[in-house]
Image (spheres, rainbow, N blue to C red):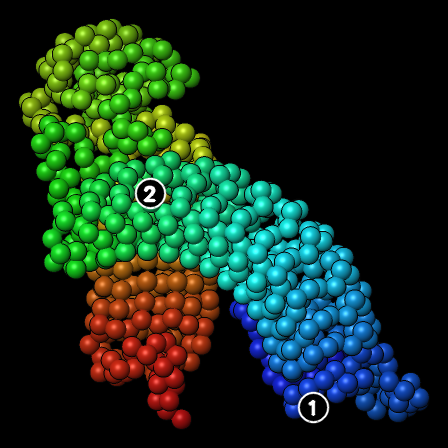
Amino acid sequence: MCGPHTRRRRYYQIREFQMASSADELESEDPDDEIELDDPTPQSNPDALPERLYDINDADEDSKKANLQQLSLNEEDAWWNQMPINNLDLSSNALTHVSPKIENLLTLTVLQLHDNALVALPPEIGKLEKLVRLNLSHNKLDELPAELFSLPELRHLNISHNEFVELNPDISNLHMLEFLDAGNNNIKSLPGGIGFLVRLTALLLPNNHIVELPPDIVNMRSLQKLDLMKNDLIALPEDMGLLRKLECLYVQHNDIKELPSFEGNETLNELHASNNFIERVPKDLCSNLPHLKIFDLRDNKITQLPDEVCLLRNLNRLDVSNNSISVLPTTLSSLAHLISLQVDGNPIKTIRRDILQCGTARILKTLQERAQAKDRETGGADAMSCGNVGAAGQSTDDMTAGSVDNSYPRQHVEPVQAQYMQYQYQTQQQQFMPQPEQCRIYYAQYNPQPQMRSQFMPVPQYEQDERYNHYLPQVQQLPYGNSFQHLPHMSNNLPQQQQHQQQPDYVNFSRCAVQPRWVYKLRHTRTLAVNLEGLTNVPDHVFELAAAEQVHVVDFARNQLRALPNGLQHMSKLVTELVLSHNAISQVHPFISQFTRIAHLNLSNNLLTDLPLEFRVLNTLRELNVANNRFTFIPKALYELQGLEILVASENRIKALNVAGLEGMSRLNTLDLRNNDIESIPPILGNLTNITHLELIGNPFRQPRHQILIKGTDAIMSYLRDRIPI
């Protein structure tokens, strides 16, 4: 009679329909905890809500009077088997008030009141001490009760689309708050003390009238997203760099005239500053934002882009449309990951209009050709590479010995009268031998003479070798040049072809030398990035150094690698992102299975035809890009990647889809198969509802037709489901 029964929640419907204002709300809601009402008719006043709502957690009189025998007939309906309500959704009911009896629902953690006509909230709402999420958007509120700011567990507050003209200073008392959306109001200023919201990760204030940010806003050390678009801001705080975790900044449609240097904002990924009055891009900004991927500067007053823009190594998208730029810097061509360059609406006279109209790839190719031509004219100075630009934006030609880190031995900062010289100790040969194909860790000393870009000396670990100390004085006395034949007892031991190597070989080698300031960047950016250097191999000790500095992002895009460098194994427990796109890699070594933390892998634009079975153990992999290779099928190992969310396999030779394999990839939401050789699309592909973004354009199949493909994923999946045989 008293056996175990599943505890059941009681359901009432008290809304016309549920309308979530964001995807975050949909993910957070538990439908089993919702109250629903049998009558779907929208309510026009609070008195129309059933009184039973506010004491729903109490047992009704009928249940209390029922005897044990009656309850045993349907025990799961008994009051002791009912759970208290946690999630209450009163949205879209045209409510103008909320009853003070709301205080009876002490177990509420989520309260949805958006899309009503509320003009005020009862003070009793402050007694809901377990409340975690409160959505008050799309109402007519102009203030919140003071009691609300004492809610100890509130983490998510949405008051957007109301009539607030200011925020109550007591909002700083919400110490647990992580998300605040106050957009689309009439707020003119932010209260002092808002910086006490140190747990806040997202602050959304778009479409207001804010003129100035309070100084303590930079105290929000957990802030990751800051949205200030469509306000009246005239400047940003100079110490924005204190927001160390900031990833996305939106300041479009303001009155900003100058951008800060963002020193300290190394995690910033997106900077949207269009439709302002910005006149220049600070040089320091370029060196301070190593992870910036999106830089939107359209519709400003910019007249020139600095050469230091090449320091934005990870930049994917640069939009400078509708400015006053007349010349594009050739250093743009050294940005290995730049896939979108928008320059429309500028008076550019140095590049033909037809080239500009051809798009990003053609523009960058033109800039690269001009950089190479300039390189030849200047006698080897690398006009295309970022190597000539110092960390602070100054030309390396202007650097002197005084600008070098004094932490290195004095012996290695003396100007050395040689160009592109390098030494490597060979234990088997018992002599120094130049190795043009291998990179060593060298100390780079810049010389003010324009014809000498840099001189390379061995790192301190070699200075104990007597041969090193023997040759060093002779090297320091060498005349300008790039040949090794000046070295006694050295060039005579080299093969004849190595004695007559041309200057470009040494220039290529000099590019891959790792300078001390690069070691500094390794430590502070946790990124090893060497692009556009023509590397065919990377020695192990480069990865050993990177591993010692806890580097977790490795980028060797746009080189000439034919395989994964063996030294990568030294970083297998650290790497989370690996970029090897635009190389000549024809196979992936099985040691890839050792990368237990990798989440993003880019192998696009190579010569791959398959992936090893060891790939299937990469459980942490979330994004894989193998576009523009030579695959004729989706590798079998990928079907076992349960955590994979994004698969880009466009521009290959794939002929068929293995839907049964794709069904096992439960988290896959993006599948890009554009421009392959797929002859037919199985209708059962439409049953894979986890795929929310599907690209199939550019394949030879006849169905679905192109008109359906361009309508998007929903139309494609619906079309396929309709053709599944019954």
Disc assigned to residue 58: none
Which of the 4 image quarters holds residue 556? Answer: top left
User: What SS does tag 2 mark?
Assistant: loop
Q: CA distance from mark 2 to mark 1?
A: 61 Å
Q: Is residue 210 above or below residue 487?
A: below
- Give residue 716's position: percent from left, percent from top: 34, 80
Point 33% across, 42% down: residue: 280
Res 77 visible: yes
Q: Is residue 251 above or below residue 375?
A: below
Please tell me how crowded label 2 is: few (under 14), some (14-19), or many (20+) other residues with Cα within 10 Å.
some
Q: Is residue 178 above or below residue 72?
A: above
As shown in the figure, which amino acid type bears the numbered disc 2?
Arg
Res 569 visible: no
Quarter that holds the N terminus = bottom right
Marks 2, 1: nearer the viewer: 2
Point 31% across, 71% down: residue: 695
- Give residue 723's position: percent from left, percent from top: 35, 89
As shown in the figure, which amino acid type bears the numbered disc 1?
Asp
Earlier along the polypeptide chain: callout 2 or callout 1?
A: 1
Q: Which residue is the site of mark 1? A: 38
- Give residue 192's position: percent from left, percent from top: 65, 47
Point 21% across, 24% down: residue: 453
Q: Which residue is the site of mark 2? A: 280
Please tell me how crowded label 1 is: few (under 14), some (14-19), or many (20+) other residues with Cα within 10 Å.
few
User: What SS does tag 1 mark?
Assistant: loop
- Say left or right for 304 vs 391: left
